[in-house]
């Protein structure tokens, strides 16, 4: 009898411990639901037994229809109202109005636009009182994860707003969008960091089920399997977003990035897909609005399988000048050397650097073959 009583005591203690842990857990969950009402990410990371439809409805509270010349969509990524959207939709000459799902309307101001990311940020303001501090539902930025295989696509039409995204994965090739110039197909824009997925709705955004925006849709292709969407990953944008928010409504500018003109070797491959061949040794590609003759040294570099960023114009900052026709191969920042494979490798680093810091750029002059390392103090 004593042994049996001892077992019951142990089971009772275990039960009390489990009950206490569950009570603590649900207390934390209840705290976030009652006090952090706008933090969708915290809610879903703590407790998520919701269906895709229910999670999608949460995300809709952070999604806005933007009127700016055309109509497009943005997702709020900060409680004070910062909409992340696709840059090529934005008309800088027009004003901004943002409409929430519940009917609220806000003024908007463009505080960031970068064609390298193809991302823009619009700061929201109260219609009557621009000084009012906004408190709005928001999501955080995330990426694809081996911990999750379930993703949600939000769509534009009322009857197809929420859909489970399928076959979600990174594409390991450059994707180019084309346009017509003098009746000829030419490259309009190139993306080397796309996420591809399938969805039954007219998607504008891809989300995971843990409260994160994963990507913004910028293009689609109709295939024999159905419609495939291409999204801009946003997980590497966190650092830049923090800088934008810290400026409290002022526009984030970066003269280092503004002085960067050229293409990486993956982009170069896309330009070569739409050339004009003048002769066997003279090929022109349509770049930056004009036809340009391909430098034979660049073509040889590309053909050898090497990576880097080729400058089509001088890169200058302060007393530093890297001449056009040079290939940037690596950047050293905070004692770490980064090889430059695609454009965003370089752009991300240039946005990371703060005033008073230095970085070193290693590049090769494609005419002379001379390799140089130069240091820049910001």
Image (cartoon, rainbow, N blue to C red):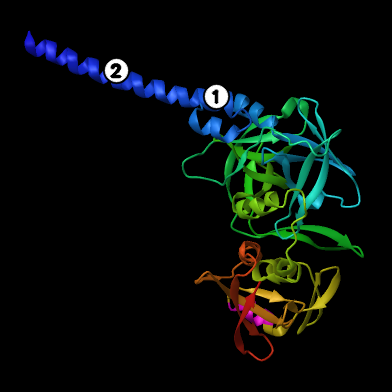
Label 2 secondary element = helix
Q: Earlier in the sequence, mark 1 or mark 2?
A: 2
Q: Farthest residue in the bottom direction?
A: 368
Front residue of this view, candidates 269 and 222? 269
Residue 347: quadrant of the picture: bottom right
Residue 33: x and y in percent read 56, 25
Which region of the structure is painted magenta? 298-304
Structural crowding at the residue carrying mark 2, measured as other residues with C-alpha within 10 Å and reported as few (<14), some (14–19) or many (≥20):
few
Q: Left or right of 124: which side holds 200?
A: left
Give how far across and how far down residue 369 sits, in percent: 63, 89
Residue for badge 1: 50
Residue 368 in picture, x, y percent from top left: 66, 91
Q: Position of residue 310 (x, y in %)?
A: 69, 76
Q: Is residue 113 highlighted in magenta? A: no
Residue 10 to residue 61: above or below: above
- The answer to whether residue 116 is above or below residue 4 is below
């Amino acid at each position: 009898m004593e042994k049996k009583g001892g077992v019951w005591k142990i089971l009772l203690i275990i039960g009390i411990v489990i009950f206490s842990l569950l009570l603590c857990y649900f207390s934390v969950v209840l705290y976030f639901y009652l006090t952090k009402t706008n933090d969708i990410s915290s809610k879903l990371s703590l407790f998520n037994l919701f269906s895709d439809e229910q999670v999608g409805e949460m995300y809709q509270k952070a999604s806005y229809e933007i009127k700016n010349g055309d109509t497009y969509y943005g997702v709020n990524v900060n409680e004070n109202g910062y909409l992340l959207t696709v840059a090529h939709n934005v008309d800088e000459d027009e004003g901004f109005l943002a409409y929430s799902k519940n009917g609220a309307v806000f003024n908007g101001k463009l505080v960031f636009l970068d064609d390298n990311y193809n991302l823009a940020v619009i700061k929201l303001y109260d219609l009557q009182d621009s000084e009012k501090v906004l408190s709005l539902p928001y999501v955080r930025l995330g990426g694809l994860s081996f911990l999750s295989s379930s993703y949600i696509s939000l769509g534009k039409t009322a009857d197809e707003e929420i859909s489970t995204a399928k076959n979600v994965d990174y594409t390991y090739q450059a994707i180019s969008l084309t346009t017509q110039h003098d009746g000829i197909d030419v490259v309009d824009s190139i993306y080397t960091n796309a996420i591809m997925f399938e969805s039954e709705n007219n998607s504008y955004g891809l989300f995971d089920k843990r409260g994160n925006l994963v990507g913004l849709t910028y293009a689609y292709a109709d295939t024999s399997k159905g419609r495939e969407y291409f999204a801009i990953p946003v997980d590497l944008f966190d650092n830049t977003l923090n800088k934008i928010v810290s400026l409290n409504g002022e526009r984030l500018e970066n003269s280092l990035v503004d002085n960067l003109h050229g293409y990486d070797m993956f982009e170069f491959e896309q330009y070569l897909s739409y050339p004009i061949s003048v002769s066997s040794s003279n090929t022109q590609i349509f770049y930056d609005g004009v036809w340009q003759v391909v430098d034979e040294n660049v073509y040889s570099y590309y053909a050898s399988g090497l990576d880097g960023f080729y400058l089509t114009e001088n890169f200058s900052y302060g007393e530093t000048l890297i001449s056009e026709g040079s290939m940037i191969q690596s950047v050293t920042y905070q004692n770490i050397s980064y090889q430059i494979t695609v454009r965003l490798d370089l752009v991300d680093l240039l946005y990371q650097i703060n005033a008073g810091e230095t970085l070193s750029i290693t590049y090769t002059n494609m005419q002379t073959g001379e390799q140089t390392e130069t240091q820049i103090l910001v």
